[in-house]
Image: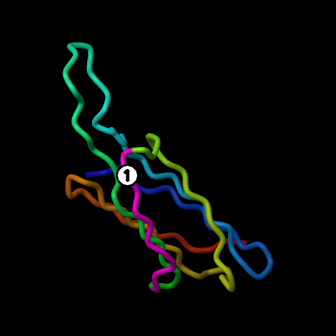
Amino acid sequence: MPDPIRIRAQAAGDHAVVRVLIRHEMESGQRQDAMGRRVAAHFVREVRATHNGLTLFTAEWGPWVARDPILSFEVKAARVGDRIGICWRDDQGQSRSDETTVVP
């Protein structure tokens, strides 16, 4: 099972600042191992963010994104106690979703 998504959502006035760490190898398919064999591609294709169950955005990623990517964004009108969710799906069919609440 994929590692949990680390999400921090903190209220800042009339919005919340959200920071996300997605643990993933993010292999591009261009690298070679010590024996000269090509390492198979394995990367996150889609990331979706939600606020209280409603989709904020969906991002399409590819092999150019670095290992263990960090994502940061702001959510307008988010209040303390609101739920922020993140889910991802990779090119091999694996997926993970986690949720947190906005803290003061």
Q: Is residue 67 left or right of residue 16?
A: left
Highlighted magenta segment, given as a residue range: 54-63
Residue 15 % position (x, y) = 72, 78
- The residue drawn where x is 36% and y is 42% is 26
* Residue in the foreground of this view, choosing between 29 and 9: 29
Residue furthest toward the top? 35
What is the quadrant of residue 19 in the picture? bottom right
- The residue drawn where x is 46% and y is 86% is 54
Residue 83 % position (x, y) = 53, 79
**Quadrant assignment for the C terminus:** bottom right
Q: Which type of secondary structure does the marked residue at label 1 adopt?
A: loop
Residue 45 % position (x, y) = 33, 58
* Residue in the foreground of this view, choosing between 60 and 83: 60
* Secondary structure mainly formed by the magenta segment: strand
13, above or below 24, in the image:
below
Q: Is residue 54 left or right of residue 36?
A: right
Q: Is residue 24 left or right of residue 36?
A: right
54, above or below 23, in the image:
below
Residue marked by disc 1: 62
